[in-house]
Amino acid sequence: MVIKILRNREIRIFLGIMSVIGLCLSAVATLFSTSGAWLVFSTSALFIVTYHQFTKWRYRELEQLSRYLQQISNGDYGLDVRDNQEGELSLLKNDIYKVTVRLSEQNALLVQDKSRLKEAISDISHQIKTPLASMTVMTDLLLNPSLSEDKRIEFISNTSVQLERMDWLVSSLLKLSKIDAGVVTFRKEHIKVEELIRKAIQPILIPMDIKEQILSISGDKSASFTGDMNWTAEALINIMKNCVEHTPEGGALSITYTENLLYTEIIVEDTGKGISKDELPYILKRFYKGKGASEGSVGIGLSMSQSIISNQNGDIYVTSELGKGTQFQIRFYKRII
């Protein structure tokens, strides 16, 4: 320990200076009395020894912290070096502990993200593998020269449908990955809710017409919020498509919107079959498909809507009752400056 301390250049210089000062004072004291010289020399020696012992204690504390940091680097975040006393070492210990807690939390998040990524890759692989396998089989059948023209047209049509499904799936996954990675820049523009809804309902008008469903829209025409028109329209489209899909023929879809001092709210409500209480907490989860989901459902539409809305200072609240329908409450909160 002594050798290790003396390797420190600053300590060697300090001890050298103190030794020189002590010897000089002792030499001066001899001019007056021998006993005074010994007193000065003893006091200087005692001071140097005390400083040395104090430095040894500090080194032991620093070595303990060094071992602690080594264990942290090996992934052991369960140690606790907090010290409630005053002093620079105590403050250092407390700061290191705070950093350790943050590292532990970040490590837990990384483990969760890794698990989610593994599940996502598995789900994506499954979703893409299914249409690929179907197209492979139909392509082999199309190569059969004895295949009838009707069957040939049917297989080509099915292949086209599967390709469209894969295109939508890949496009949606790319959008989700961009949002998750934080590389999407959401514009901050003044959006009138009336114009947003007018744009969002266009893709669902034909499916609603085919199912003879009724659409009603009402609200405060002056309602608005700050956000990205295109991305928000996509979020609304996914929600409304979900409502149309789960509402039977002759059903109804209503859209109402309001604005107050705290937020702008858009409510999308259908008269569909509803969602059971045990499924309700999961319908916004990625790749979750409810019991009543269609065969071609992937389970990322509502998840994408939530990501888009939450990235624009918003929230989605879902309430539902079996046999009566589902309500989506979308709120964009005012930003307090």
Image (tube, rainbow, N blue to C red):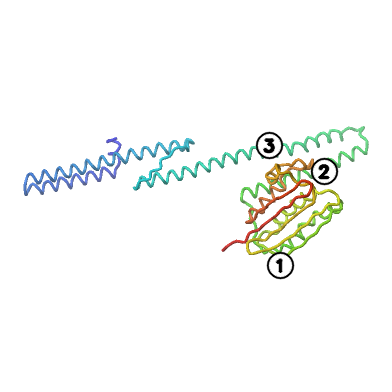
Amino acid type of the residue tagged 3 in the rendering: Ser
Q: Mark 2 or 3 closer to N-term?
A: 3
Question: Disc 3 or 1, which lies upstream in sequence?
Answer: 3
Q: Which quadrant holds residue 330?
A: bottom right
Does the residue at mark 2 contact the one at mark 1 (Cβ under 8 Å)?
A: no
> Would residue 213 appear left or right of 171 to someone viewing this image?
right
Q: Which residue is rendered at x = 84% and y = 40% of the image? A: 158
| Closer mark to the observer between disc 2 and disc 1 | 1
Instruction: Determine which residue is flagged by label 2.
Output: 161
Q: In the rendered structure, which disc, 2 or 1, sits on the residue that comes first in sequence?
A: 2
The residue that appears at 76% across and 52% down in the rendered structure is 240
Q: Residues within 10 Å of mark 3 (few under 14, many from 20)?
A: few
Image coords of residue 221 (percent x, y)? 73, 66
Q: Which mark is residue 122?
A: 3
Q: Report, in whole angstroms, how far the alpha carbon at label 2 lies from the one at label 3.
A: 23 Å
Q: Secondary structure at mark 1?
A: loop
To which residue does mark 1 refer? 222
Q: Is residue 107 left or right of residue 245?
A: left
Asked whether the beta carbons under mark 3 and mark 1 sit within 8 Å of each other, the answer is no
**Residue displayed at 15% across by 42% down:** 42
Q: Report the quarter where the N terminus lies.
A: top left
Instruction: Classify mark 1: residues with Cα within 10 Å, few (<14), some (14-19) or many (20+).
Output: few
Image quadrant where one finds the C terminus? bottom right
Residue 250 at x, y percent in the picture: 86, 52
Q: CA distance from mark 2 to mark 1?
A: 41 Å
**Residue 267: x, y in percent?**
72, 56
For label 2, the crowd category at 10 Å Cα-Cα, with few meaning under 14, some 14 to 19 and many 20 or more, is: some
Secondary structure at badge 3 equals helix
Amino acid type, residue under disc 2 in the picture:
Val
Distance (Cα) linking label 3 and label 1: 46 Å
Q: Which amino acid, by three-letter code, is at mark 1?
A: Ser
